[in-house]
Image: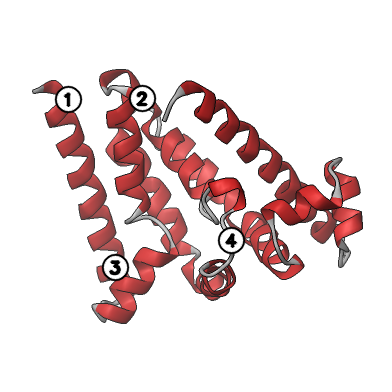
Amino acid sequence: MVEAEKGRYRQRRRTRDGIVTATAALLEAGESPSVNEIADAADVSRRTVYQYFPTLEQLLIDATLFRLSQAAVDEAIDAAGADGDPSERVAAMIRALAAMSAETLPLGRALIRLTTDAPRPDGQPRRGFRRVGWIERALDPIRPRLSPAEFERLVSALAMVVGWEALIVLGDVRGLSEQEQLDTALWTARTLIRAALDEADG
């Protein structure tokens, strides 16, 4: 990804985060916000809201997931960051998400249903911005050891084993218990991180 594209991606992610954060704040206040109210709170236009969230339902689900998971995952990553071990930071993120899966997985399934066939906004991902941000944060200590392309590839690889899609595959396709799902996700994440570092060091 060239630098100009990265800049646009970061700006789009900030705009999207602002919309979700504003929506979550309205929900926290006990409101059932309309798109107009959300746009005003986020200081964007209605058109911008719809560019990122084609339906109000999708936005409300995303904002609810934000409320349920954001603080817990951020705190887990920070608590595991004393020695900067990326495997432990990623493992803490995976454990935090798994601990909330009973609450969040039904919402995640609904979000997947709403976004699978939806148009991609400006050619960007349909969902998963928050997940990518967490993965990037968890991997920050090893960013200097990897080239930009190697870092982006590792983020992409971990995005396949972190989140609802991975839990759905492990549960629905493999029939694993919740503990087995967690153990498999942790093993896979450690393996991917080790492989990326070995390749970079070699």
The answer to whether 91 is drawn above or below residue 104 in the figure is above
| Badge 1 density bin: few <14, some 14–19, many ≥20, Cα 10 Å | few
SS at mark 4? loop
Cα distance, mark 3 to mark 4? 31 Å
The answer to whether 113 is drawn above or below residue 98 in the figure is below
Cα distance, mark 3 to mark 1? 29 Å
The answer to whether 177 is drawn above or below residue 61 in the figure is below
The mark total stands at: 4
Residue identifier under label 2: 141
Cα distance, mark 2 to mark 3? 26 Å
**Nearest the eye: 103 or 33:** 33
Residue identifier under label 3: 181
| Badge 4 density bin: few <14, some 14–19, many ≥20, Cα 10 Å | some
Residue at screen point 61% across, 51% down: 121
Q: Quadrant of residue 2?
A: top left
x%, y% of residue 192? 21, 44
